[in-house]
Image: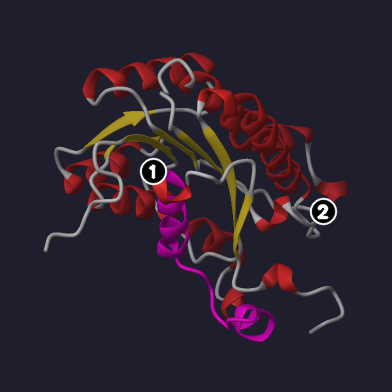
Amino acid sequence: MTAVERLSGKVAVITGAAGGQGAAAARRFVSEGARVLLADVADEAGEALAGELGEPARYRHLDVSAEHEWDEAIRVAESVFGPVDVLVNNAGVLHLAALADTALADYERVVRVNQIGAFLGMRAVLSSMPSGGSIINVSSVEGLAGMPGTVAYAASKFAIRGMTKVAALELGERGIRVNSVHPGMIDTGMLRDVAGDAMDGFAKSRLALGRLGESADIANLVLFLAGDESSYCTGAEFVADGGATAAYALSR
């Protein structure tokens, strides 16, 4: 008996799709029958992934902070695949610095990509998305609680959480669901670049599951929210953090 593809017939746009969590989601979506527009600014890696995934995938350069590029990306997705059923706002950047050492330019750069990018994506896709569509905004555990050194990042991820709830309330009458995903310590290039190998020891000593998350852990959660199995989920926060938010500060 052939397994039913969970995203058969659906068209998706995934930002930040050239690597990490975005690439893992793209592979998972294609394996479940979706056609996917891969959007990123890392053109070489994005084109390579599209080539790997074949006919169900197409790469498009997209600076998520640029309003006009969003309109063109949605137009391309429609012309190649059809109306967009799923949007995954995954693109993001991280800047680590104490509040006193955070330059305005760095703060604005993080907000433009993480926060404004998600806003522009949600707004742009509405011209294409039919009833039954799903918008998935990737926030973070730093969108649920603060952590020193992340003032810009946390501000943007808290904003995503709030925008998600407002959009869910406004778009419910159109049959469009909007949810946020909150990853914890996921072993991606972005995190390795800033934390190095120290995060392995931290995960073993501080997380309930004793390990870092993998991109596939988030891709599986995003897959659930993209498909019809989550048809009664909207305006909600879905956490995948190995137990990080289960504790309070003095518990470990």
Q: Is residue 107 left or right of residue 187?
A: right
Residue 41 in picture, x, y percent from top left: 41, 34
Q: Viewed as shown, does residue 206 lie left or right of 173?
A: right
Estimate the spatial distance between the alpha carbons at disc 1 and disc 2, rounded to whole Å.
Answer: 29 Å
**In the displayed image of the protein, which residue is found farthest to the left?**
1
Indicate the amino acid at tag 2. Answer: Ala
Residue 166: percent from the left, percent from the top?
Answer: 70, 31
Name the image quarter holding the C terminus.
Answer: bottom right
Q: Return the x and y of residue 139 as percentages of the image width and height.
A: 62, 47
Q: Image point 70% across, 46% down: which residue?
A: 153
Mark 1 or mark 2, which has the lower sequence index? 1
Secondary element at image label 2: loop
Q: Is residue 145 above or below residue 30?
A: below
Residue holding disc 2: 98
Residue 51 in the image: x percent, y percent? Answer: 17, 43
Please indicate whether residue 23 sits to the left or right of residue 135 in the image: left
Residue 185 in sight: yes
- Please identify the quarter of the rendering in which residue 76 is found: top left
Tell which of 95 and 132 is nearer to you: 132
Above or below, 33 relative to 145: above
Q: Which residues are magenta?
A: 201-227
When the figure is inspected, residue 140 is found, relative to residue 174, above or below; the finding is below
Residue that mark 1 sits on: 17
Foreground of the two, 207 or 126: 126
Q: Residue at x 43, y 53 (%)?
A: 224
Picture residue at 55% right of the left edge, 20% below the top: 123
Q: Main secondary structure of the magenta part?
A: helix
193 falls in the magenta region: no
